[in-house]
Amino acid sequence: MEVALENATNNVTLLRRLHSASGLFPLGAYLCFHAWEHWPVRVDRDALFARLEHSSNTVLEVVLVLVPLLLHAGLGLRLAREPNDGAYAGRAYRKLQAVTGALAGAFLLYHLVVSWLPRLVESTGAAYGSTVEHSGTLGGLIVHAVGIAAVCIHFGQGLGAALPRLFPEQLEPRTARWLGGSLALALWLAFVNELASYATYAPLM
């Protein structure tokens, strides 16, 4: 009985580390890259197209983003049934992580349909036009604003929980949460600025 319980605990610990790693390295790194990739939209369409011509790679996006995203989501659903391991500051923060995860997943699916599939099927110009069209309406703007906030909060909290799991001897939980929150705020500001450029052709900052 004790051996079975120990094995189950070890399995959950392994799943948590895999969940943290999949969110931190492929997905978190790509989130930062995506903010950088679309930053030229603040200037104009041509500047964005010039950046995307050299930075976009559909195969890498499938391998390094879509596959890890499905893995991360599946592990998140599995681990939601497990008790809190102390990685989050409290029950409310863990519930917030679950809610933002669901919202972020729904938004990413919407984002794939609106922005990624038009580029895959047609061209970068088609993806740009679709994004401008959808973000230019009140409903589309609200969906993007809520989705961006959910993605950034989920990433920031996840980063704060992942770092102590992956580097327990190097980082205190409070320091990790501060780092996660700071990076999430920076990403949110970048994405909101880019959203404004798509919706109104003018950045907020």
Image: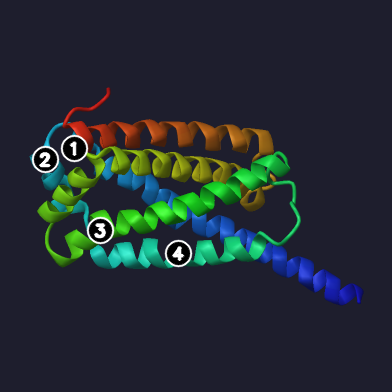
Determine which quarter of the picture holds residue 200. Answer: top left
Q: What kind of element bears circle 1?
A: helix
Question: How far, Cα to Cα, is label 1 from label 2?
Answer: 6 Å
Mark 1 is on which residue type? Val
State the residue at coordinates (27%, 36%). 194
Mark 2 is on which residue type? Arg
Disc 2 marks which residue?
A: 45
Question: How far, Cα to Cα, is label 1 from label 4?
Answer: 27 Å
> Between tags 2 and 4, which lies in front?
2
Question: How far, Cα to Cα, is label 3 from label 4?
Answer: 17 Å
2 or 4: tag closer to the N-terminus: 2
Say whether marks 1 and 4 touch (CB < 8 Å): no
Which disc number belongs to residue 68?
A: 4
> Between tags 3 and 4, which lies in front?
3
How many discs appear? 4
| 55 or 116, nearer to the observer | 116
Observer able to see residue 192: yes
State the residue at coordinates (57%, 42%). 157
Disc 1 marks which residue?
A: 41
Q: Position of residue 134 (x, y in %)?
A: 23, 46
Question: How far, Cα to Cα, is label 2 from label 3?
Answer: 17 Å
Say whether marks 2 and 4 touch (CB < 8 Å): no
Q: Is disc 2 surrounded by few (<14), some (14 to 19) or many (20+) residues within 10 Å?
A: some
Q: What kind of element bears circle 2?
A: helix
Mark 3 is on which residue type? Trp
Say whether marks 1 and 2 touch (CB < 8 Å): yes
Q: Position of residue 113 (x, y in %)?
A: 28, 60
Q: How is the image coloured?
A: rainbow
Mark 4 is on which residue type? Pro
Q: Residue furthest right?
A: 1
Q: Is disc 3 surrounded by few (<14), some (14 to 19) or many (20+) residues within 10 Å?
A: many
Q: What kind of element bears circle 4?
A: helix
